Amino acid sequence: MCDHCGCSTPSSPHSHSHAHERAHTHSQDRGHHHHHDRDEERRTIALHQSLMAKNDRLAEQNRGFFKGRGTLALNIVSSPGSGKTAILEATLRALQDDYKMATIVGDLATDNDAARLRATGAPSIQITTGTVCHLDAHMIQHAIEDLGRAPLDLLFIENVGNLVCPAGFDLGEDVRVVVTSVTEGEDKPQKYPSIFQNADIVLVNKIDLAEAVGYDRKRALEILRNAAPGALILELSARTGAGLDAWYNLLRARIRAKVGTEARH
């Protein structure tokens, strides 16, 4: 699925190993087979390291761009259906009189989410990734160019719905936000630890459905705090509006903090 991180490419060491074993009997040239596997593994690791190093360099360029423009950039990640687009819709409408905002939206296909966000009046750039299951720093650079030179207070980057690959790609953001929902159960942070370990903020959405789906809030929060010890956890509902004021106030505080930090430099 992922052309960049190699999580399911045909040339990955795991899949290559199985294909190669089917082509040979157990007794055929075992030494050559293992040598070939080691070479393939080294090439895969080298390519992965090169791709990640390039991404990190571009992410730093993006970070410098955001800093120079005084833009607070948020990378918002989640599994599909968590409600991150609904949260962004509500946020853009609630803060539109106070801040200049825009969104960059990543999706495998369609621009449905970007169209929803444009309806709020905020500029929105769609990145259609095809088979690539995450956004990377290079994609964000191109999207920034498409947004133009108008100053922005807030840039929301809505990543592809996926809790695996986006964890490894720095986009140059100031804040990484993970959205989860009560309908996904309590143990998502245990199943996908990397994405939560790197979170600055975790939004637990759809709390209005907690009772209906038998959500164990105490257990869920305990798991979340263990998985994301450095993250601020907010519980909310994009549908009813419960908890959204705390989210808006957090964004206001982050904007003030960024402006204050950059003014001192």
Image: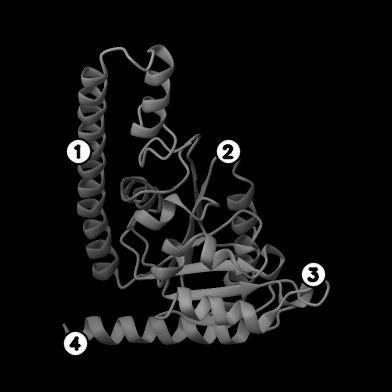
Q: Quadrant of residue 72?
A: bottom left
- Mark 2 to mark 1 CA distance (whole Å): 30 Å
Q: Secondary structure at mark 2?
A: loop
Q: Earlier in the sequence, mark 2 or mark 4?
A: 2
What crowding class fits label 3: few (fewer than 14 Cα within 10 Å), some (14-19), or many (20 or more)?
A: few
Give the amino acid type for the residue marked by disc 2 in the picture.
Ala
260 w.r.t. 143: above or below: below
- Mark 4 to mark 1 CA distance (whole Å): 41 Å
Q: For the residues carrying marks 2 and 4, which lies nearer the camera in this image?
A: 2
* Residue with the mark numbered 2: 109
Q: Secondary structure at mark 4?
A: helix
- Mark 4 to mark 3 CA distance (whole Å): 48 Å
For the point 46% across and 84% down, the residue is: 252
* Residue with the mark numbered 3: 213
Q: Secondary structure at mark 3?
A: loop
Along the viewing direction, whichever of 239 and 191 lies nearer the viewer: 191
User: Are the residues flagged by discs 2 and 3 in contact, CB closer than 8 Å?
Assistant: no
The residue most toward the left is: 265
Q: Earlier in the sequence, mark 2 or mark 1?
A: 1
Q: Earlier in the sequence, mark 1 or mark 3?
A: 1
* Residue with the mark numbered 1: 46
Mark drawn on residue 264: 4
What crowding class fits label 1: few (fewer than 14 Cα within 10 Å), some (14-19), or many (20 or more)?
A: few
Q: Earlier in the sequence, mark 4 or mark 3?
A: 3
Query: In the rendered view, does 244 fall on the left or right side of 165?
Result: right
Give the amino acid type for the residue marked by disc 4 in the picture.
Arg
Query: In the rendered view, does 127 fall on the left or right side of 240?
Result: left
Give the amino acid type for the residue marked by disc 1 in the picture.
Ala
Q: Position of residue 43 (x, y in %)?
A: 21, 31
